[in-house]
Amino acid sequence: MTRGLIIQIISFFLYLFIQVFFLKNAVLFHTAFCFLYVAYLLSLPVETNPLMLMVIGFLMGFLIDTFYDSLGLHAFASVFIMYIRNFWLSNIIPQGGYDSNSVPALGVNGLQWYLVYMIPMVFIHQALLFFVEMGGFSMFWFTLWKVIASTLFTASVIIIVQFLFPDRSRR
């Protein structure tokens, strides 16, 4: 096993632990939920095989579903964002392209690029999660408000984590 793989495995369980034991009940105004585990999924190396991305997304989502009793909602949303991740990364290539073994991180690519990368992905994750949970569009405006509030809350926490623990491998 390489050092990078060991760090990824430890990070997987660390994000899972933090999500389940600390952030499960972190809700602002009964509307905004924080799903920090999405940060792990978004920080996987750029050159990761798409099938492997979806398997990792499924495993993370399934384990979150196990603790949240959410019947596959997190697994579905996680697999979907892992499915579209490489397409999105190919559309927002930074000037000079991606380095080999690079990770999409704030410390590597800068704040503006990271926000353009992260916010749409988090928004799609939240939209899938909450609209499927609602069972359709019957409460569209309330659900949309939940999606926007949760996206802002999750994105803010992800940015704080990125600033507290910058990726030092490319500096």
Image (spheres, rainbow, N blue to C red):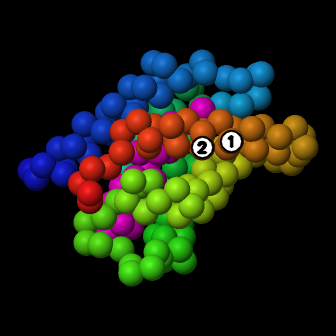
> Which quarter of the picture shows residue 16?
top left
Q: Residues within 10 Å of mark 1 (few under 14, many from 20)?
A: some
Q: Which amino acid type is shown beneath numbered disc 1? A: Leu
Q: Residue furthest front?
A: 171
Q: Position of residue 5 (x, y in %)?
A: 19, 50
- Badge 2 marks a residue whose secondary structure is helix
> Which quarter of the picture shows residue 30?
top right
Q: Which residues are magenta?
A: 34-53
Q: Residue at x 47, y 28 (%)?
A: 19
Q: Mark 1 and mark 2 in contact (Cβ < 8 Å)? A: yes
Q: Is residue 41 magenta?
A: yes
Q: Residues within 10 Å of mark 2 (few under 14, many from 20)?
A: many
Q: Residue at x 58, y 56 (%)?
A: 115
Identify the mark at residue 152; answer none if there is no mark. Answer: 1
Q: Which amino acid type is shown beneath numbered disc 2? A: Ala
Q: Position of residue 10 (x, y in %)?
A: 25, 37
Left or right position of 128 against 2: right
Q: Image height check: is 40 above or below 44?
A: above
Identify the mark at residue 46; answer none if there is no mark. Answer: none
- Badge 1 marks a residue whose secondary structure is helix
Q: Image height check: is 54 above or below 37?
A: below
Q: Residue at x 45, y 37 (%)?
A: 161
Q: Is residue 74 magenta?
A: no
Q: CA distance from mark 2 to mark 1?
A: 5 Å
Is residue 165 something that shows in the picture? yes
> Which quarter of the picture shows residue 129?
top right
Q: Residue at x 25, y 66 (%)?
A: 101
Q: Name the residue beneath numbered marker 2.
A: 155
Q: Position of residue 84 (x, y in %)?
A: 53, 66
